[in-house]
């Protein structure tokens, strides 16, 4: 999926799925890396 096809709704669902169940915080840069792997594309901070 290219970054042009990633809607805020899709991104939000993936973020929620990647967050730890125990409520442990995740740094923004770490979340971007996890999302980049998930979507197989670079996730920029401005997306």
Image (cartoon, grey):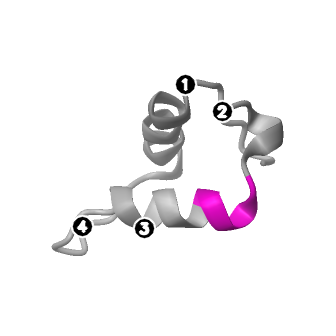
User: SS at mark 2?
Assistant: loop
Residue named by callout 4: 24
Q: Position of residue 7 (x, y in %)?
A: 75, 57
Q: Disc 3 and disc 2: Cα gap in Å?
A: 18 Å
Q: Disc 2 and disc 4: Cα gap in Å?
A: 28 Å
27 in the magenta segment: no
Q: Residue at x 35, y 56 (%)?
A: 18
Please identify, in this view, whether the residue under mark 2 or under mark 1 is nearer the observer: 2
In the picture as drawn, the residue positioned furthest to the left comes out as: 22
| Mark 2 / mark 4, whichever is N-terminal | 2
Q: Disc 1 and disc 4: Cα gap in Å?
A: 25 Å
Does residue 44 sit above or below 12 in this rendering?
Answer: above
Residue named by callout 1: 40
Q: Position of residue 22 (x, y in %)?
A: 16, 73
Residue named by callout 2: 1
Asked if the residue under mark 1 is in contact with the one under mark 2, i.e. CB atoms within 8 Å, the reply is yes
Q: Disc 3 and disc 1: Cα gap in Å?
A: 18 Å
| Mark 1 / mark 4, whichever is N-terminal | 4
Q: Residue at x 54, y 41 (%)?
A: 32
Residues in magenta, as a range: 7-11
Does residue 45 sit above or below 20 in this rendering?
Answer: above
Task: Please tell me the numbered disc located at residue 16.
Answer: 3
Asked if the residue under mark 4 is in contact with the one under mark 3, i.e. CB atoms within 8 Å, the reply is no
Dominant secondary structure, magenta: helix
**Around disc 2, counting alpha carbons within 10 Å, would you say few (fewer than 14), some (14 to 19), or many (20 or more)?**
few
Please identify, in this view, whether the residue under mark 3 or under mark 2 is nearer the observer: 2
Pick the residue in front: 18 or 30: 18
């Amino acid at each position: 999926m290219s970054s042009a096809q990633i809607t805020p709704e899709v991104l939000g669902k993936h973020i929620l799925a990647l967050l730890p169940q125990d409520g442990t915080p995740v740094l923004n840069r770490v979340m971007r890396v996890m999302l980049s792997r998930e979507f197989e594309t670079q996730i920029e901070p401005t997306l």
